[in-house]
Amino acid sequence: MADPVRPTAGQDDEPERPDRAAQPPESTPDSGGLDDARAGAGEQARSAKPKKKGSFWRELPILVLTALVLAFLIQTFLARVYVIPSQSMEQTLHGCPGCTNDRVLVDKLTYDFTDPGPGDVVVFRGPDSWGQNEFYSNRSDNPVVRGIQEVASLVGLAPPDERDFVKRIIAVGGQTVQCCDEQHRVVVDGKPLDEPYIYWEPGTGPEDMRPFGPFTVPEGRLWVMGDNRMDSADSRVQGGGGENGTVPVDNVIGKARFIVLPPSRWQGISDHNPQAVALGAPAWQAGLPLGAGAVAAWPTLWLGRRLLAPWRAQFRRRALGRDS
C-alpha cells in the first residue's frame, strides 16, 4: 500500500535556498555606527531627567552650607545687623516700649584701619563694671532651643548672646571731660561741644544735666553718652562713673552706619564730630569718618551679594527645572 502523499508548502514556487534564508540582512558600512549613536542618544535622553533631579538634591546641602558660611564670615568680619531695644539714643535711633525698634547695620571693618573717634555711634560689649543692661538677647533655658539660637546667631538669624550697648563717643583717651559750662554744655579739654543730635524729653532741658567731672579718660578707653541725655545709662553712671564708666576700645564691636529696618526709617546715622567746631578742626575733617565708612560699607555689602548671587541663581534654576 502506498504511503499517503503529504502536501508540501510552496511546491509551485521557486525552491527555497537555505543559504540565503540564514544570511542576515545586508547593511551599509556606516549603519552599525549610526545605530549605536542613536541607541546611545536615546539612553542618554532617558537618563538625563533622573540624573538632573538627583544632582539638584545632592547639591542643595552644599548650596545651603556655602550660604551659611558666607553669612557667618560677613557678619563676623565685615558687617552685622543689630536691634536697638533701648531709648537712650532717641531720637537718632528709635528703641522704646511700644514702638518699632530700629535695626542698624554695624560696620566691623572701619576700626581695623582707624580708631574710634568723637561723634561715632558705636556698638560695644559692656565692660564688667557696667551693671545696667540695655542691649542684650534672651536665651532659652531649654538646651535644644538654646543650641538652635546659638547656631542661628552665627548667621544673623538671631541676636548674639552678648551684653551689648549702643552710645555716642564724646571723648577719647587722654582727653578731659566734664559738665557743664555756663550754657549747660558738656566740655572737653576746656572747649564746649557742639551737639545738635541731643534729644531732650518733654519737660527737661540742658539745665537738668547733672554735673560731673572733670575727669581725664585713660588711654585706650572711651567716654560715651546717649543722645537722649536724660534717659541714658552711660559713662556718667555705669560703674559709679569715672574710670569704671569708660569703655575699653577693644570692646567696640563696630560703628553703626545705617538704619535698615523699619523701611520708613531708612537713613544713615549721623557721626557729627562735636569737637570739630569747638577745637577749630577744618570742616572737611568732620566728614572723613562718614566718607571712610561709605567706602568700607558699600563694597562690603556689594561683595556679599556678588558672592551669593551665583548660588542663588543656580538654586532658582534647578528648583524650576530649567538648568541647562
Image: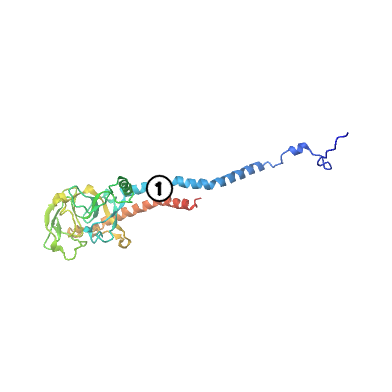
**Foreground residue, 294 or 100?**
100
Colour setup of the view: rainbow
Residue 244: percent from left, percent from top: 15, 49
Give the residue drawn at x 42%, y 50%. Answer: 311
Q: Quadrant of residue 4?
A: top right
Give the residue drawn at x 47%, y 50%. Answer: 318
Q: Quadrant of residue 101?
A: bottom left
Query: Residue extending furthest top?
Result: 1
Residue 68: percent from left, percent from top: 37, 48
* Residue 221 horizontal side relative to residue 321, left or right: left
Placement of the N terminus among the 4 image quadrants: top right
Looking at the image, can residue 256 be seen?
Answer: yes
* Residue 64 horizontal side relative to residue 33, left or right: left
Mark 1 residue type: Val
Query: Residue extending furthest front?
Result: 1
Residue hosting label 1: 64
Question: Within 10 angstroms of label 1, few (less than 14), some, or many (20 or more) residues?
Answer: some
* Residue 25 horizontal side relative to residue 310, left or right: right
Report the number of numbered marks: 1
Looking at the image, can residue 115 be seen?
Answer: no
Query: Residue extending furthest bottom?
Result: 203
Query: The residue tagged with tag 1: helix, strand or loop?
Result: helix
Residue 199: percent from left, percent from top: 20, 62
